[in-house]
Amino acid sequence: MKEKVVVGMSGGVDSSVAAYLLKEQGYDVIGVTMQIWQEADAQQPDLEGGCCGLSAIEDARRVAAQLEIPYYVMNFRGEFQTHVIDYFIREYRLGRTPNPCIACNRYIKWEALLQRSIGIGADYIATGHYAQLGRTSDGRYALRPSVSTGKDQTYALYNLTQEQLAHTLFPVGDYTKEQVREIAGQAGLKVADKPDSQEICFVPDHDYAAFISRSTGKSEPAGNFVTTDGEVLGQHQGISHYTVGQRKGLGLALGRPVFVIQIRTDTNEVVIGSKEDLMVTELTAEHMNYMAASHFVTGQRALAKIRYSHAGEDCRIAGISEDGSTVRLLFDRPVRAVTPGQAVVLYADGYVLGGGTIV
């Protein structure tokens, strides 16, 4: 009897090729698009290349018809509101910079989709993410970087659990993006040349502060831009407009490049400093998820990525809470713009060891 796999299909080339490859490998494949938008008119931005909206559904449906596999649209609006949108708004209002894609992967594309898939008799779920799955010598499931270094998505998947990984397939992790497009073309898939989606799917215009204001019905109070020693430099528009490391859009003419180096929610201040002020040698992370590692030990070394586009910096574990949920890292060299709310993900020996949220 064929093993059954549910493929999360976004209408893009990666998930379409994932479904194609799995069918070629002999799996019983079912295509599913996750409907996440809260209102029908929120689908319109998807026409510019987003995921999970109306055009995504139509593209995914056409690919499923080409592949002759069953296709369904599953409603995950409630889960998406709770675990992604509400989290996104809450974090910005607390002066942190959230990563909604990580939350969506953990709670929507895996937890919610996996539960429903198992409920209909599936053995696995699969996506078009660029990652590889392996097992360590002690039997733990762990992600390995994709062969396509520039497209590797393991950073955004660090939070998956052992149970989720045990029921996951990553068909495109063995290929480069160019090879995936070539496979799509050879298979005659109409999405072979579809552009990649780059923006946060529910804020396609990148105006996060306006989205938060519309969603909550509340405008944020203005406050002061200040230096590290308290000098007032001007007025900011509300803290959700800013993130650590930001240079553009500050509206400050000081005759020199300046950056956001800290956001103080207790005083509603945005602290401004130099490029040098952004460089730090340590960070603390909480809510640790362990993947290849079952735990960390003080002095353990790893490569740490502090954002998706970060190449990584060598570090060592300098401290661990008793329950392992919080760690402190010391970097071999200073890193730029460590941002509260973002993830730090640790790698060693070709595996994702685990990661957590920067505080």
Image: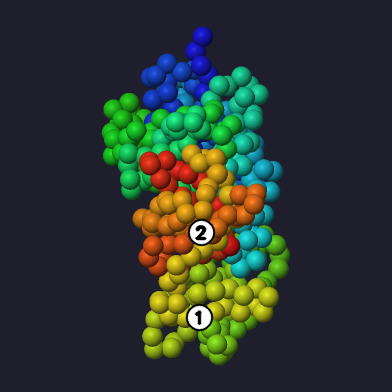
Q: In front: mark 2 or mark 1? A: 2
Would you say the residues marked 2 and 1 are in contact, meaning their CB atoms lie under 8 Å apart? no
Q: In the shown orientation, is residue 75 left or right of residue 201?
A: right
Residue nearest the viewer, comparing 215 with 54: 215
Q: In the shown orientation, is residue 356 left or right of residue 248?
A: right
Residue nearest the viewer, comparing 91 with 40: 91
Quadrant position of the C terminus in the picture = bottom right
Q: Is residue 348 above or below residue 60?
A: below
At mark 1, the secondary structure is strand
Q: Is residue 228 above or below residue 84?
A: below
* Residue occupying image coordinates x 57% and y 78%: 270
Residue nearest the viewer, comparing 339 with 13: 339
How crowded pointer 2 is (Cα within 10 Å; few <14, some 14-19, many 20+) is rated as some
* Residue occupying image coordinates x 43% and y 52%: 301
Q: Does any portion of residue 320 appear in the rendered image?
A: yes
Going by the picture, which residue comes out furthest to the top? 1
Please state the horizontal and vertical placement of residue 331, each as a whole percent of the image: 42, 62
* Residue occupying image coordinates x 32% and y 39%: 147
Please state the horizontal and vertical placement of residue 238, each as a whole percent of the image: 61, 74
Q: In the shown orientation, is residue 163 left or right of residue 67?
A: right
Query: In the rendering, which numbered label is found on residue 272?
Result: 1
Please state the horizontal and vertical placement of residue 95, each as a whole percent of the image: 61, 68
Q: Does any portion of residue 177 appear in the rendered image?
A: no
Amino acid type, callout 2 = Ala
Q: Quadrant of residue 14?
A: top left
Mark 2 to mark 1 CA distance (whole Å): 29 Å
* Residue occupying image coordinates x 45% and y 33%: 136
Residue nearest the viewer, comparing 66 with 138: 138
Which residue is tagged 2? 318
Please state the horizontal and vertical placement of residue 336, each as a whole percent of the image: 42, 67
Amino acid type, callout 1 = Ile
At mark 2, the secondary structure is strand
